[in-house]
Image: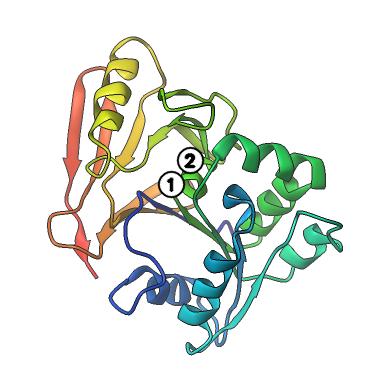
């Protein structure tokens, strides 16, 4: 039973008015789900980890986080026990490289195949697709071409929060870049397996988009 993937464009996270935390617990479909935060893309910044525990520590779940810097202790084995894997934003290219060194890429595939929820914002959303638009290599946005490929096509986060993303992504797709999806800040695409189930938003007006060479199609969002 393949699980869900929740690709979040960016925006508010871990705050009292952020609705995605409750959504992930609901999608886990079990009492007190085990939720693991993976902050690899931001080099495990302590404040991000603290924010995660601040948001999930008071909810009906079992939070933990995954460390890949230093000397990690069987990180893939830890993921095998999780119901939700929540990936933070930052550098998508660095995240994917470290995951592959430690076998996290295969551990995530296996977790998803058994029904776990995979989620994340920005880099933590880019990673599930075949390709994305990224600033991993500098300020100039460019294609990455190295995603995990659990979801076909491409993804662009921060669609309304960083205006240049929209300009670059639509131009790339018009020129032959793989078609795919985009999400505004505070919007998320929810996939059941590989099928788009719905778009959700924690802010009025935030939405997702299907983007092809023919143009962009706004997708209505359910407000959380």
In the picture shown, does residue 48 fall above or below 217? Answer: below
**Secondary structure beneath disc 2?**
helix
Is 214 left, or right, of 101 in this rendering? left
What whole-number distance in Å separates the C-alpha atoms at marks 1 and 2?
6 Å
Dot 1 alpha-carbon crowd within 10 angstroms: few under 14, some 14 to 19, many 20 or more: many
If the image is split into quadrants, where does the C terminus sit? bottom left
Sort mark 2 into few (<14), some (14-19) or many (20+) by Cα contacts within 10 Å: many
Q: Which residue is drawn at 28% across and 16% down?
A: 171
Which residue is at 41% across, 47% downward? 195
Question: x, y (%) of residue 76?
Answer: 79, 58
Out of 184 and 3, give the one closest to the viewer: 184
Which of the pair 81/57 is nearer the observer? 57
Quadrant occupied by the N terminus: bottom right
Residue found farthest to the top: 175
Q: Residue at x 50, y 77 (%)?
A: 29
Q: Dot 1 corresponds to which residue?
A: 122
| x and y, in percent, of residue 180 in the image | 36, 31
Location of residue 114 (image quadrant): bottom right
- Horizontal side, residue 72 vs residue 129: left or right: right
> Quick check: marks 1 and 2 in contact, CB under 8 Å?
yes
- In the drawing, what numbered circle is on residue 30? none
- Asked where in the image residue 159 lies, by quadrant, the reply is top left
Q: Nearer the viewer, residue 118 or 46?
A: 46
Q: Where is residue 89 in the image (x, y as percent from the top left)?
A: 49, 50
What's the colour scheme? rainbow
Residue placed furthest toward the left: 205
Residue 4 in the image, given as x and y percentages of width and height: 49, 58
Q: Is mark 1 on a helix, strand or loop?
A: loop
Q: Which mark is residue 126?
A: 2
Can see residue 149?
A: no
């Amino acid at each position: 039973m393949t699980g869900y993937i929740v690709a979040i464009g960016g925006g508010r996270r871990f705050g009292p008015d952020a609705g995605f935390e409750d959504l992930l617990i609901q999608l886990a479909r079990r009492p007190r789900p085990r939720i693991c935060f993976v902050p690899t893309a931001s080099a495990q910044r302590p404040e991000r980890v603290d924010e995660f525990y601040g948001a999930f520590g008071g909810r009906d779940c079992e939070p933990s986080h995954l460390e890949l810097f230093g000397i990690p202790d069987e990180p893939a084995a830890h993921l095998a026990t999780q119901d939700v894997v929540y990936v933070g934003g930052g550098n998508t290219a660095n995240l994917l490289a470290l995951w592959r060194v430690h076998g996290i890429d295969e551990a995530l595939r296996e977790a998803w195949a058994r029904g776990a929820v995979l989620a994340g914002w920005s880099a933590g959303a880019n990673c599930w697709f075949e390709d994305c638009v990224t600033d991993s290599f500098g300020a100039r946005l460019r294609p990455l071409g190295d995603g995990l490929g659990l979801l076909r096509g491409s993804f662009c986060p921060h669609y309304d929060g960083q205006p240049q993303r929209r300009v670059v992504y639509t131009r790339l797709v018009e020129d032959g870049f793989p078609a795919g999806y985009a999400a505004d800040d505070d919007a998320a695409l929810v996939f059941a397996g590989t099928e788009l189930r719905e778009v959700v938003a924690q802010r009025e007006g935030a939405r997702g988009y299907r983007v092809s060479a023919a143009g962009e199609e706004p997708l209505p969002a359910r407000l959380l």
